[in-house]
Image (spheres, coloured by chain):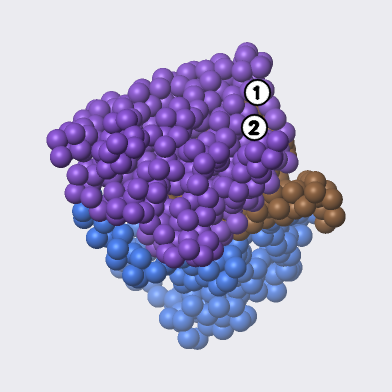
Amino acid sequence: MAGFLKVLFRNVLEGPSTDPFPLGATFTPDRLRGRARINPELCMGCGICHNSCVAGAINITHLPDGSGYTITIWQNSCCLCASCRHYCPTGAMSITSDWHSAHPDTDKYDRLEQHTIKYEPCAGCGTLMRPIPAALAKRLYAATPHLDPEKIRHLCPDCRRQEDAKRNAGIVTATTTETVAAREIVSAAPTKY
Amino acid sequence: MSLDTTLKKLSVRSPWLFRINAGSCNGCDVELATTACIPRYDVERFGCRYCGSPRHADVVLITGPVTTRVRDRVLRVWEEIPDPKVTVAVGICPISGGVFREGYSIEGPLDRFLPVDVNVPGCPPRPQAILEAVVLARSIWLKKLGFE
Amino acid sequence: MTDTLLAIVHMAIFPGGFFALALGFLYKALDRRVEARLQRRIGPPLTQPWLDAAKLLTKETLIPKTACRSAFLLAPVFGFTGMAVCAAFIPVPGVYSGLFNMGDLLVIFYLLPIPAMALMLGGSASSSPFGALGFSREMLLMLAYETPLLMILLAVAMLVGKGLGAESSGAEFSLLKIVAWQQENGSLGFNPAMIPALLAYLIFLPGTMGMAPFDVAEAETELLEGPLLEYGGPLLALFTVTSAFKTFVVLGLGVALFFPGVLGSWWPVNLVWFVLKCLALMLLSLTLVKSACGRLRIDQAFRFYVTVPTALALCSLVLVWLL
């Protein structure tokens, strides 16, 4: 008890350490995990976030006419684990430090993060597709400067494959008769374990 | 202003809190204890007090996804609380079922069984968010008494 | 006729009734506030007990179906009445000398356990198992702390009786004479023979007020407030008012028994002096101990009360008898 008395005496000397919140301001650490946000510019609709979300808070539905998709986060089910941010390949998911989550029950179903993203026609064949986000395309084709990311990102996967084939066809000479030497396979190893 | 009105207006400045654990993982309960025990959050500033008996409670904080076994007990304890009372669902579990949603023993969400007034989602919510919820519960209590 | 009227005024306004209530609530608020400061918190505003009481008055009253209705409703009234009367017997040195100029120690000793009895009555009438457990604990604790209290009162009475010599018959139980004797011959709190008794009284205070480490009967974490479990609304408000009265009574009694000194003859100064002395007594024996200790088990609390304060009080009693 004597030790406690010493602590109590020191406490009185130091004064209260109470945060003035909610009457005043409080602090928010930068890395605090609060409300989840989607950047509609970057989202490709791949669905990895939907699959990795433990709480099942993320839903992706395709529009009935096939002209796009809607991605929804229900904040009232989000457990702030940040798996979506970790697994999102395009970096569209982010966790803000906004922790002001208290709300009356009447607003319960309004607390959504929802974006409807429309498909665009492919520059080659006109099929509806989601163009690769500009920032992502720039990153993807950084190693191949002779390709124009702005042009290639508006192509659907099929058209991109055809473009690639055309380009490579010009490199390989068709007239030679000698057999092509067995080449080492340099593509990535199969991802199946 | 009559005596009754005065008393009612003053009454919201003394919200006594009561916790019900409806099958929670204890994460939210720890945050609730934090608001009372850690000097930084000091919920006693608003006249709050965590009371042991449901008969003394004004604001009831419910955590957990309402499991099958605990459902009837939660409802029974909730009925014991004298009116007017404000129900606060703490954490995502009572609000939507959270990570336990659609589990075989989960009966929630909570507002299937009783009227919830304030939600404070989070897994767990920040202590400051719980303080915000208590302040919000106070204004809802005032509304229930017929003011504003 | 005027005597009766005066007694009613003393019970309703000063020092019982309103004054005791205001002072008791002030002490309760200060207790919570100082405790918060000791824990580096801010704590509730000083008006908090009043707000709590106002809140409780607006809540609905629920009575358990299986409870004994009349006893359940009467218990808080019983405790309240006992303490309201008892408060009028407490002398404020230099201002007021007790009801009918009497302030008999034995009357106070009989009236003091009434709130605890009311708690027991209410707890057992509520038909709740927690109430019954709280009842048994309250009873056990009361048996343990009443013995040292009786010995303290006896030691004081014997010492003053000896001092008065021929005027009294061995022991002096009139609080009026005890206060007057101390004002002439020095306060008992500074008398070496009475220091053990003073310590015993300081230990007695948290037990009778049901505060940590001796809040075993109302332990909210294990017994869900024990006897108070089923009470809510205005009935609980009555219990808080009783508790405020009791704070005033036990602190006022402590001041009257051990430190009844006055500052001059102007009564407002004496009143403030009395309030400050009570406050010091409370901070020392209730708030400081409460914030430094956890709750004891019932057997530990019982064993503590039947040994330490009893031995201290007995020590004083023997010293007084020998000297």
x, y percent for residue C44: 54, 57
x, y percent for residue C254: 38, 45
x, y percent for residue C113: 45, 29
Foreground residue among A4 and C316: C316
- Residues tagged 2 and 1 counted as in contact (Cβ below 8 A): yes
Residue that appears at 66% across and 16% down: C69
In whole angstroms, how far apart are the C-alphas of marks 2 and 1?
A: 8 Å
Label 2 environment density (alpha carbons within 10 Å; few <14, some 14–19, many ≥20): many
- The chain ID associated with circle 2 is C
Foreground residue among B10 and B42: B10
Q: Amino acid at mark 2?
A: Leu
Question: Which one of the lettered chains is coloured purple?
Answer: C
Mark drawn on residue B47: none
Foreground residue among B50 and B108: B50
Q: Amino acid at mark 1?
A: Leu
Per the image, label 1 sits on a secondary structure element best described as: helix
Which residue position holds label 1? C73
Residue B119 versus residue A93 in the image, above or below: above
**Residue C23 appears in the rendering:** yes
Residue at the outermost left position: C322
Residue that appears at 60% across and 68% down: A23
Position of A155 with respect to C188 (left or right) is: right
Which residue position holds label 2? C235
**Residue B119 appears in the rendering:** no
Question: Which one of the lettered chains is coloured blue?
Answer: A
Residue that appears at 44% across and 65% down: C264
Give the colour of chain B. Answer: brown
Residues flagged by tags 2 and 1 on a common chain: yes
